[in-house]
Amino acid sequence: MKQNQECLHETYVWEVPVRVTHWVNVLSIATLSVTGIFIGSPVTLGLTASAYVMGWIRFIHFVAGYLFAISVVSRIYWSFVSNRYAGWREFVPFLSAEGRRNMWRMFAYYTFMSRKVPHPIGHNALAGATYLLVFLLYLVMILTGFTLYSEHAPHGPLHALLGWMFAHFSNQGIRQTHHLIMWFLIGFAIHHIYSAWLMDVKERGGVISSIFGGYKPVQGRE
Amino acid sequence: MEKGGSKGKGENPEQCFDVPRALAERGITRRDFMKFCTAMSAALALPMTLVPRIAAALESDARPSIIWLEFQSCTGDTEALLRAANPTVGEIILDVLSIDYAETIMAAAGHQAEEARAKTVKESRGKYIAIVEGAVPMKDGGIYCCIGGRSALDIVREVCGGALATITVGTCASYGGIPAAAPNPTGAVGVKEAVPGATVINLPGCPVNTDNLVATVVHFLTFGKLPAVDGKGRPLFAYGKRIHDNCERRPHFDAGQYVESWGSEAHRSGHCLYKMGCKGPETFHNCPVQRYNEKTSWPVGSGHGCAGCSEPQFWDTMTPFYRRLPNVPGFGIETTADKIGTGLAVATAAAFAAHGVVSGFRHKDDESKDGKGGNQ
Ligand code: HEM
Ligand code: SF4
């Protein structure tokens, strides 16, 4: 460890847009999940008919929905112009032989088959592939969310854009999907926080603080 | 109704019937008639200035023939039309039309009845209006519904194919409805699917709202064409708005006041039926405004959630009717998305907690350069 620390230096890994979209996603997914659970199975909180509990909760859900959508789309755009740690190639490691090898190494470490802690600078390969899946789920959430949202204005542009979804997946199917994927995302969040903590402890790569400050301690020159 | 039905259009010239006299005979005043015309202009979302035009159109001698066909149906739409407590102007307007064929209400029977239909189809080709109630079975050559020895498919092709326009009343005729519910043993479809070439306007709902039927006909008589429709072939004046957005329980939805069980205090106080499975947020129809039985009430008004009956395939896609979301396929019948989701979240947390404990005890993880792998 000692000799490691001597040649550690800081590398700027997560640029501002990466960190901003990350935290906007965290906040909006938390808000969307809490409000979404209430929308899905509300309890009577209104004391009189002039209260506006569901009204506000839905309003917050939709505003957070817009915020989330903008954040996700920005992050996808950024993956084409960012530094290499945040670039789109990070999310498809399985396309290259080396990436597949890295995924295997990480898998072996996670499942206690190997004691070697991989030390990637950006995402580890397995995480990168997971984020691809998570972003696909995000896109499904956004698509189903805005489709449901479009129903309040059946002659509006949003409905013209997304109305076809109803014919293909049925209204109830879209609601069900929107609802179920929330739980997948909650499951992902639990996994994500745990893995970040594990890597912070084991790899000592400062992965947790890196998403606040952007810098990661890296061994040697690149 | 019988009056129109028993009279063939061909021989009996129009002068035998005129609207002002028919109205007077039934004790409907001019004032009532004008009120009706105004109500129709409102239902159709037309400006008041068109009321005189509607009145003039209704009073004219133009009497398009009507053929009312009935296939796989419960006759609910005919009933809705006939069971009105008092004869309404709307009914009389339908009397204005010459109903040449309608099994339930016509005086003629058997071959005589079939002849009346054949005659209209032949003599007024391209000029009569077909009204269809009930789905058309397509499977096995259409043998599952036959009338007078001919299949429904055969009849609907002939009658709707030669009609000026077809109005489907009820969800079965519009989209197949209940006969088409999975597994759809008879291959039931709506008229537009059975006769793709026909000009069809759909008035789905169980049953059709008579006011909407009359308004569609009035629109046709006044302007000579059918009203504008949405993507599902339904007139926008009646299906352009969502039930949820016009519902009288909506303030309780927004307020956060929900019925949790039938007959509860909340139920009796008229709170929102969302948690009881109301499909008003997914259904387009003017029930809350137009209501049924002379505007007496409608399902949500009388305490039952909307079943989404005016949407295609509602029997399959709007279920369960008494809960919000369906069960997740592949899991036990009482397993809802939330139970699966909570299970998933707890299992994830437990798995990672276990992983964390194991990791915590593994002190000898390799920190050497090798461990760095080939990453980056
Ligand atoms: C991670 C993101 C999201 C989560 C976890 C989430 C969660 C939920 C949940 C659980 C429901 C209740 C579904 C039901 O039981 O019927 C819901 C409803 C809904 N969500 Fe989302 N949602 C997300 C994103 C979005 C987005 C981006 C939009 C777009 C504006 C959106 C719009 C809606 C709408 C319109 C409804 C239906 C509200 C209603 O019918 O009153 N959601 N959401
Ligand atoms: S009763 Fe149904 S349609 Fe009415 S506000 Fe509640 S959910 Fe909407």
Image (cartoon, grey):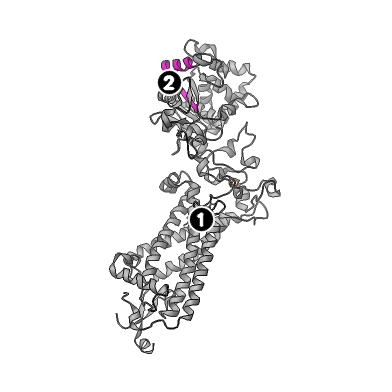
**Are the residues flagged by discs 2 and 1 from a single subunit?**
no
Q: Disc 1 marks which amino acid? A: His
Q: Is residue B120 shown in magenta? A: yes
Residue A44 placed where, x, y %?
Answer: 64, 55
To which quarter of the image does residue A110 belong?
A: bottom left
Q: Mark 2 points at which residue?
A: B127
Classify 10 Å Cα crowding around label 2: few (below 14), some (14-19), many (20 and above): some
Chain hosting mark 2: B
At x 35% / y 76%, what residue is drawn?
A: A121
Q: Does the residue labelled 1 lie within 8 Å of ligand 1?
A: yes
Q: In this view, does A6 lie above or below B57?
A: below
Q: Which mark is residue A179?
A: 1
Numbered range of the magenta stretch: B114-133
SS assignment at label 2: loop
Give whichever of B196, B184 is nearer the camera.
Answer: B184
Q: How many labels does the image show?
A: 2
- On the image, the x and y values in percent for residue B197 come to 38, 29
Residues tagged 2 and 1 counted as in contact (Cβ below 8 A): no
